[in-house]
Image (cartoon, rainbow, N blue to C red):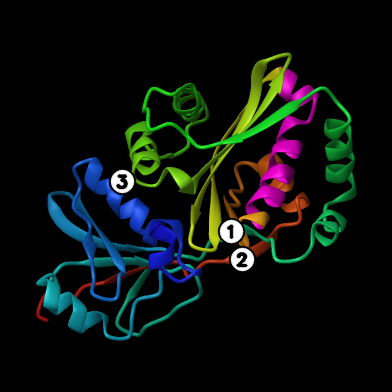
Amino acid sequence: MFDAARPSTHALLQDPAFVAALRLCGQNPIVLPDRTVLLKRRFFGMPVLMLPRALPPDDLIEQLKAAGVQRLPLVLSPERPWHRPRALRLHRPQTIAKVDLRPSAEVLRDRLHCKWRNQLKRAEAGPLKLRHSHLPADPDHPVLRREAEQARLRRYAHWPAPLTAAFAKAAPEQTHLFTANLKGQPVAHMLFLSHGGRASYHIGHTTARGKAHCAHNLLMWRAFCDLAQRGIEEIDLGLLDPRTPGLNRFKLRSGAEMVRTGGTWLRWRPWA
């Protein structure tokens, strides 16, 4: 398994399965000797390196020199607060919702907001049937088609379907698809991707009938319980976007804590 090759604290974009998925899609990320992943992009025709969701290693300059890319602009977006005097800040820190799954199920349930917990109780007493499976490596899978349509309508950034499908092909055991069915028909789903001892919320969709039965409360709670049993210690529910207060409230009421990122920084030493 890919997970065994990395410590349990690395982010999704630093996971070997993500690197394998990029390569299946024809991209060629740089993996430094310490396994730090760098992405290659072009802005206005200029090649740029990106270090996503990781603190730069202490010997970053030496590793960049060894890879022959020390002269390229480097955009860093560390998970945790970080500051270096020779880097220019491009964007202020953002806030992520994270859930600690290490406590018992009883403690996790006590941490739920009372309204969130009441919705969960209603869903548990209702007719929904849940299924936990792996995502097929098919870019035309109904879950990925719904995600593409939802992202288009709501105008938010998301992984292209071929990249998610490539991740499923590279590491099927790291995909966790939770589906709620009503009378044999799917009415809601949530997809999580695991990476080491952590997992990230990736895709979610519900219908009017799913909303009426509080399907997402039940799906998320089942994900908490199932993933915890599989050794997952933390779930990243994604950024808290001021443009989506309802979604933010749903995440935080599930017992999530707000965690600040390290912002976005530019390091460029063309004379190096």
Marks 1 & 2, CB-CB < 8 Å contact? yes
Which residue is rendered at x = 67% and y = 48% of the image? Answer: 226
Where disc 2 sits, the SS reads: strand
Give me the C-alpha separation between circle 1 and circle 2.
5 Å
Does label 1 or label 2 sit earlier along the sequence? 1
Where disc 3 sits, the SS reads: helix
Q: Quadrant of the C terminus?
A: bottom left
Q: Which residue is mark 3?
A: 21
Residues packed near mark 1 inside 10 Å, few (<14), some (14 to 19) or many (20 plus): many
Q: Is residue 70 visible?
A: no
Q: Is residue 86 above or below residue 140?
A: below
Give me the C-alpha separation between circle 3 and circle 1.
24 Å
Q: Which residue is mark 1?
A: 96
Marks 3 & 1, CB-CB < 8 Å contact? no
Task: Tell me where the magenta segment starts and ends, as one range.
Answer: 209-228
Q: Nearer the viewer, mark 3 or mark 1?
A: 3
Where disc 1 sits, the SS reads: strand
Q: Nearer the viewer, mark 3 or mark 2?
A: 3
Q: Position of residue 196 (x, y in %)?
A: 48, 62
Q: Is residue 157 visible?
A: yes
Q: Which residue is mark 2?
A: 259
- Please name whichever residue, 53 or 18, is drawn nearer the observer in this view of the structure: 18
Q: Furthest-front residue in view?
A: 1
Q: Quadrant of residue 230?
A: bottom right
Q: Magenta region, mostly helix, strand or loop?
A: helix
Residue type at numbered disc 3: Ala
Q: Position of residue 159 (x, y in %)?
A: 40, 40
Q: Position of residue 51 (x, y in %)?
A: 32, 65
